Amino acid sequence: MLEEGRISNRQAAFLVITTILSTTSIGFLPSMIYQEAAQDSWISILLLTVYGIVVGRIIMSLGMRFPDKTIVEYAEIVTGRIPGKIIGFLYVLFFLYLNTFPIRFFGELSITFFMPETPLVFFLIGIIFAAAYAVRSGLEVIARANEIILPVSLTIGIILAIMLFPQMEIKNFIPVLEKGILPVFKGTYVALVYFAETIVMVMFIPYLNTTRRTRGIIFKSFVVISLCELLAVVSTIAVLGELAARIPVPAIFAARLVSLAELIERVEPLFLLLWVIAVFVKVSVFYYCFVLATAQWLNLKEYKALVLPAGVLLTVLSVVLWGNIADLYEQMVKLVPYFVFVEAVLPLVLLVAACLRGKGGTAGEN
Amino acid sequence: MKIKLFLVFLILHLFVTGCWNRVELDRRAIVAGFGADKAEEEGKIQVTVQVVDAGEIKAIPLARGGSMMNAVTVYTGTGFTAFDAFRNLSMVVGEKLFLSEVRVLVIGEELAREGLDKVIDFYERDHEPNIRDYLIVVKGGEAKEVLETELRINKIWAYGIDSMVKTTMAHSKAPATEIIDFLKAVESKTTAPVATVIHVLRKGNEENAGEGKSNQDGTTAVQPKELKVSETAVFRHYKLTGWLDEKESRGLLWVTGKVKSGIIVVSSPEKEDKLAAIEIIRAKSKIKPEITDGNLIINIDVWEEGNLGEEQPDTMDVSKPIVLKELEEQKKTVIEDEISAAVIKAQELNADIFGFGEAVRRKYPREWKQLEDQWDEIFPTLEVNIAVDAKIRRTGKITKSAEPKP
């Protein structure tokens, strides 16, 4: 087998949480949701949570039919050799392409808010180099690192929210559903991609050290994700109000507004710390999925040889795919249907096909 | 092998020591105050910055034999936009200006009348400035003049202005507006933004202004110029449209619930010519819109609590509850008066500085859709009811003032 390491259910849940939260709560998503749903963004989050759990259940059910294989391997079993290879390739591309968003965004954010004259590639090489090291060390290492990173970043996030408390205004949430329910649905649209990132589980299931109670992973992760997400969205709206729509990363903007007794001010370096470690995990996870999927797709015996070339590819793609930040946003919205297809629709189709053709075991446990 | 690799990484650290555009502290011109005016040349903007002389901050203060009372240098330059003008200043200063330590953004009246949009965007977009800085408009003057005024409360004059604005909480006769408050009001469809106002007071006439009472070292004890923070600037969107005087300013603060402290002067219930001063301890307010039969009424509820701080002798016996009751009534009238003065002025200017529109929107989102577009016609004739609940809780260390016995 390509990967010798094994992770526990808890580690898998932690990975899913960090992966989703790093872009959704502290990244650009709250602003994009706010642009549509305004003060009702929190309802969008609740809807998205339900959606995330449903998609997560589909993905887990599919994965548990083949508890010792990844999607690249069992796609061939379910659909036959050629279509299976095509589906496998889709996932390879998906893991590569989706990863360029957080990488590029990480660079853009660091430049805009902290170091305006530093060339972009230095940030990208920095984060990809760190991620490459993690990926080379294997899944177990990423999972263990994340066991430290996630609690640390959650603590920082909560501290930031507490520090902003004096500036929160509850009236920013009223009136509820001012423009009807439609904007709330529109607000969920962009986020559909990010709340279905449980798709990484299709690569992790064979490496879980137990096949019992695996479904709990999804539910537990989404409880945490939803709570953190609400905390992030609610506190940014409470602090910034309508300003949140114009600011790509409201959380960091809000962090700048912290002022406690004129003593604790401008705490955004704290935010940068949180952002760097969380994005590092997310990038590593997708990077790992890409490398592993490629190795399996090509029937290689080892994936480690692919790590460095993949890193170079990621760096180059992150730089050349988008000319500027406006480009990045436009693509992010445009590509939603394609990403959602790969993340949610395709697993559902595979699950139905597997059930109909009687492939794979009956879904593990219940 | 591992040791070698470790060493390689260790050595790498020597070369990656910091951010790309780092500028050491002593090579940085730290700006403490930022001012913007309309330049004399048409279409240009004049920017004034107060740069901190880093070496002078720690210098021995004048009182203990030091030589300098100021630790700043003021530079002025022009450009087509605020950013342009600001960067042009580096030609004069010789160092790159650093904006993160700015605490006050001062705007000249002329530029404010033309529109703050020419400055605020830069201030919000750039990564250095903080939008929690105070926004101050100079009434009848230029920002340049304000930033050039020597202040004694702080060696860094701009920080002196900053503490003057913070001190508005002691008198509540001017709002302390942060840029973010301004922006939030700009983004609202109906709310009119406000800003703090600063005045330049010139002592005596210009000629002998420089020849005040001289100290031994040649500096003057009486400053030729002084600054004063009071009153409110009222905007429509980005453009300055009018002013609230001190009374109206406090009226505004009553409604927005931002009165922290201050003195209310009332006449004594028993003798008209004698006065009493009551200190505000805390206050709360609520704006309650009400629609009955299609008529919109705004109810303002203000609750205030204060202590008697002063009475002019030979007036009243405040140990009697009935006297305090009367005083409370008096105080209530004064507060109501202040609020209605502000409301009348705001309606005259047709500027919804209180956020009535937002309050209606929150309470009646459905009806608001029709009202929204006509708000400019509705607001000036809006019926506003003011209900004040004023309390006097304590009367200080004594009950009666000293009186000559008959």
Image: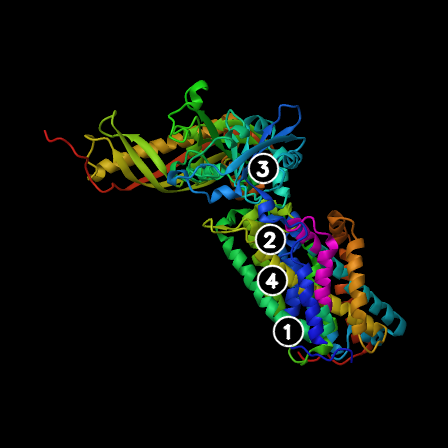
Residue A216 visible: no
Mark 4 to mark 1: distance in Å?
Answer: 23 Å
Q: Is residue B139 above or below residue A251?
A: above
Q: Give whichever of discs 2 and 4 has the lower sequence position.
A: 4
Q: Residue at x 65, y 80 (%)?
A: A212
Q: Nearer the viewer, mark 1 or mark 2?
A: 1
| Same chain assignment for discs 1 and 2 | yes
Q: Is residue B353 above or below residue A335?
A: above
Q: What's under tag 4, amino acid-wise?
A: Ser
Circle 1 crowding by C-alpha within 10 Å: few under 14, some 14–19, many from 20? some
Cα–Cα span, label 3 and label 2? 21 Å
Q: Position of residue A1 (x, y in %)?
A: 78, 80
Most common SS among magenta residues: helix
Residue under label 3: B186
The residue that label 2 is drawn on is A251
State yes or no: discs 2 and 4 in contact (Cβ < 8 Å): no
Q: Is residue A116 magenta?
A: yes
Alpha-carbon neighbours of circle 3 within 10 Å: few (<14), some, or many (≥20)? some
Instruction: Name the residue beneath numbered marker 1.
Output: A144
Give, as a three-letter code, the residue at label 2: Ala
Find disc 4 in the rendering and name its residue.
A226
- Nearer to us: label 4 or label 1: 1
Q: Give left or right: position of B381 versus A244.
A: left
